Image: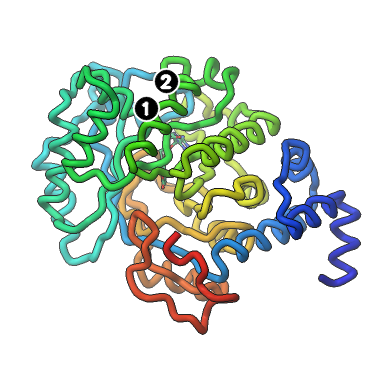
Amino acid sequence: MSRLMESRLAASGLDKIYHKILDGVRLDACDGLALYQTPDLTSVGFLANLVRERMSDNLTYFVRNLHINYTNICNKGCKFCSFYAPAGDPRGYVLSIQEIQDQIRKHDDVPIREIHIVAGINPKLPYEYYLDVIRAVKDARPGVQVKAFTMIELAQIQRVANKPIDEVLADLKTAGLDCCPGGGAEVFSDRVHEELFRAKLDNEGWFDVARSVHRAGIRSNVTMLYGHIETVEEKVAHLLHIRDLQDETGGFMCCVPLAFDPVGTELSHLPVTTGYANLREIAIARLLLDNIPHVKAFWIMTTPAVAQLALWYGADDLDGTVTHYEITHALGDNSHHQELRHDQLLAMIRETARQPVERDALYNAVTPIPLSTAVRGPKRANA
Ligand code: V47
């Protein structure tokens, strides 16, 4: 490292963290706070990039995927959510099995690898509906991987199934569930839980369901929703909770920092997160989560422009083509058509001199990774 960079890290008070990273020493909560407090984002990004390249070399993952939200009816009333409709609201919908298949068949010409399925907590839906959703997806698109149901939805599915979670997970696996998305984690803080999503499964409950999922051999992602009322201490604690759980189960594939979009929510007075903040969240997730293989810059929430920059700030995954995203609106208009085509994703990644790797939902590379283009060889191509 150049003397200039060394003195810059020292001036920002980040030199100790740099040496910990070089020596493979775990960062702690104080380091996390220092990374949030320094204005020197470039140095935070430099450190995150060291870890990113150590874990994923020069590779950047993306997936051709489709999001399906089977119902927006929800009884949780989370203050950060603009997607849900309470029971009886005229905006409420439940997709029939036929409608779900129709949504998939509209894209028959695209080699989609992952179908991402999440929705509201609608207590009217019977157990069989959830199993049928997965079977219907596999029927409409044989071979596709189904990434479905957050820990919150799984708790609801268990409630209606009225049987042990392990049996429910076995049924879902038999139906075709391949892995679970990371949603519903929000921020693991009792204060934020009480303020924003009181009716939802509590933090310990989320951990318990995640433990069961991983014990069942189903891998999942994990999110952190930031940019609302949370403090930096709460974000550091959230990330360290995830790290502890990963030490225990090893079941997380990817962390997805999600920027809060206030439009249409009860928190609409809050500002939209900035590019500066979004890059920092991605970098700190990469630095604190030394045991999670991937960090995703979800372009829908950060904008494609910032997600692209994030590839040098710790992220090694851009998610995917997405196509239609109901949870938040497209920036600048009111639509839910939110899509990056395959060629656009490739161009974004290549412009940053990263090596694109098309993946499936479980991070298996769809095509072999060319050896010559990785920074130090594709060590963790299929991690
Ligand atoms: O659980 C809700 C969040 C999540 C808002 O696992 C909001 O690969 C921002 O989890 N502004 C669903 N976020 C989305 C999600 C996800 C997305 C992409 C990839 C993966 C993955 C997971 O969206 C919810 C909640 O945490 N959310 N409302 C909002 N206004």
Per the image, the residue denoted by label 2 is 201
Q: Residue at x 58, y 23 (%)?
A: 189
Q: Outermost residue, bottom direction? A: 372
Q: Residue at x 78, y 37 (%)?
A: 30
* Identity, as a three-letter code, of the amino acid under mark 2: Leu
Task: Using residue 141 as the reference point, say whether residue 251 is left or right of it.
Answer: right
Q: Residue 303: percent from the left, percent from the top?
A: 51, 54
Name the one closer to the observer, 146 or 37. 146
Q: Which of the labelled discs sits on residue 152, or is there none?
A: 1
Mark 2 secondary-structure assignment: loop
Whether residues under marks 1 and 2 lie with C-beta atoms below 8 angstroms apart, the answer is yes
Please give the name of the residue rendered at 47% of the width and 44% of the height, measured from the top-left corner. Answer: 250
Label 1 lies in ligand 1 vicinity (Cβ under 8 Å): yes
Looking at the image, residue 216 lies above or below residue 353:
above
Reply above or below: 161 against 149: above
N-term-proximal mark, 1 vs 2: 1
User: Where residue 132 sits in the image (x, y, percent)?
Assistant: 13, 37
Say few, some or many: other residues with alpha carbon within 10 Å of mark 1 (under 14 / 14 to 19 / 20 or more): many
**Judging from the image, what secondary structure is the residue with disc 1 in?**
helix
Vertical placement of 65 versus 150: above or below? Answer: below
Q: Nearer the viewer, residue 229 or 25?
A: 25
Q: Residues within 10 Å of mark 2 (few under 14, many from 20)?
A: many
- The residue type indicated by label 1 comes to Ile
For residue 174, above or below residue 187: below
Residue 225 showing in the rendered view = no
In the picture, which quadrant includes the N terminus?
Answer: bottom right
Query: What quarter of the picture does the C terminus occupy?
Result: bottom left
Q: Residue at x 37, y 27 (%)?
A: 152
Q: Is residue 276 left or right of residue 377?
A: right
